[in-house]
Every structure is written in C-alpha cells, then in structure tokens.
Image: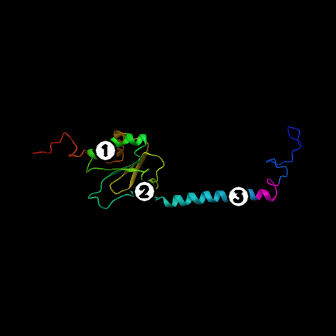
C-alpha cells in the first residue's frame, strides 16, 4: 500500500517504520503509561478535595471577639491594582459599620498560606460570613461599596450604620 507521496505505507501512524510502538507489546506500554498518568492526576485531585471542608466556615475565627458579627474577609495584595481600589472601600466599611460588621483584609502575597486556607483562586476575593462563621457568599474581583451592602441585604443581613461613625448622630450631651 502506498501513501499520497508514493512511499510504501506500513500502517505505522508514528512514522517509525517498524510499527513496534503502535502495535504489539509497545502499544500496551503506552496504554499503561497513560493509565498511570491518569491515576496520578485523579489521586491528586481527590487529595485536594478531601482537604476542602464540605461546609465552609471562617478559618480565622477568633475566640477573643466579644460578640459574633457578620464578617467580610477580603483576600488580596497591597500591590494589586483592583485590591488597591478596594482598600478605601474596606476602610470606609470598617469605620461606618464598626460594631455591626467585622471587616478584615488579608494580604496573600505577604501571607501565602491564607490563599490555600481560604481556597481562593483570584485576587481580590471577598468572602461573606454570617455571625456564626458560616460562609454565605464569595465574590472574585473588584466589588464596590454599594454592591457589597446590596449583597449583605440579599443575604438577609441588615447592617445599620454605627452611631460612632454616623455624622448625623449627636453623641454629645
């Protein structure tokens, strides 16, 4: 049998001419290697999935909190552009909702273990937790202040502006 160039075609797809890698015992070696490779990939994925908790709770929940508050954790880096855009929003939320919501920023470039602990793939990532530490929602990328507050309302958590930070509230007597 000849191919389009007029050369004899021995049926070997790899072009080796002998057909030993594509038929006979050579074929089974390649199949065995492919099966072993697939087994390694599956085993790694299973190991990673076993380390991820089924119900996500806040890994950094601290016992020194006086009261349980809903918590917003922003994982990012101080040199990441969208993260830099988030910084003033997070500071404003921290001040405006002091005592109503805990706002936390974790720099994953300075603390690389945090990325794995929280299972993030992209920065910035915002994770919303209820007062018990149960994860309610996570968002990847920039998230504006009004969007964050709307998400809390959508999740059923109404945050009232803290009297300490509200300029319309007169606290002096």
On the rendered image, what quadrant is the C terminus found in?
top left
Can residue 56 be seen here? The reply is: yes
Q: Mark 3 packing: few (<14 Cα in 10 Å), some, or many (20+)?
A: few
Which residue in the protein does label 1 denote? 91
Q: CA separation, marks 3 and 2?
A: 37 Å
> Which residue is at 54% across, 61% downward?
47
Q: Mark 2 packing: few (<14 Cα in 10 Å), some, or many (20+)?
A: some
Dot 2 lies on which element? Answer: loop
> Which residue is at 65% across, 57% downward?
37
Q: Mark 1 packing: few (<14 Cα in 10 Å), some, or many (20+)?
A: some
Tell me if 33 is positioned left or right of 14 in this view.
left
Q: CA separation, marks 2 and 1?
A: 25 Å
Tell me if 57 is positioned left or right of 3 in this view.
left
Q: Which callout, 3 or 2, points to the residue nearer the camera?
A: 3
Q: Residue 16 at what x, y percent from top left?
A: 82, 49
Q: Is 64 within the magenta?
A: no
Dot 3 lies on which element? Answer: helix
Where residue 114 sits, quadrant-wise, is: bottom left
> Which residue is at 52% across, 58% downward?
49
Look at the numbered discs 3 and 2 and tell me whether their residues touch, using CB distance below 8 Å: no
Q: CA separation, marks 3 and 1?
A: 54 Å
Mark 2 or mark 1, earlier in chain: 2
Q: Which callout, 2 or 1, points to the residue nearer the camera?
A: 1
In the image, the segment drawn in magenta is 20-28
Dot 1 lies on which element? Answer: helix
Which residue in the protein does label 2 denote? 56
Where residue 57 sits, quadrant-wise, is: bottom left
Look at the numbered discs 2 and 1 and tell me whether their residues touch, using CB distance below 8 Å: no
Which residue in the protein does label 3 denote? 33
Mark 3 or mark 1, earlier in chain: 3
Can residue 159 be seen here? The reply is: no
């Amino acid at each position: 049998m000849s191919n389009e160039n007029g050369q004899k075609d021995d049926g070997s797809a790899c072009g080796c001419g002998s057909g030993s890698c594509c038929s006979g015992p050579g074929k089974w070696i390649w199949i065995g290697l492919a099966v072993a490779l697939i087994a390694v990939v599956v085993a790694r994925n299973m190991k990673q999935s076993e380390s991820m908790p089924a119900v996500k709770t806040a890994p950094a929940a601290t016992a020194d909190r006086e009261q349980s508050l809903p918590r917003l954790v922003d994982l990012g880096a101080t040199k990441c552009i969208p993260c830099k855009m988030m910084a003033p929003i997070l500071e404003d939320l921290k001040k405006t909702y002091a005592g109503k919501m805990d706002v936390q920023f974790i720099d994953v470039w300075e603390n690389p273990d945090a990325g794995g602990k929280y299972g993030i793939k992209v920065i910035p990532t915002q994770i919303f937790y209820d007062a018990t530490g149960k994860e309610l929602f996570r968002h990847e990328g920039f998230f504006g202040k009004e969007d964050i507050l709307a998400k809390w309302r959508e999740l059923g958590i109404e945050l009232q502006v803290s009297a300490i930070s509200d300029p319309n509230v007169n606290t002096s007597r």
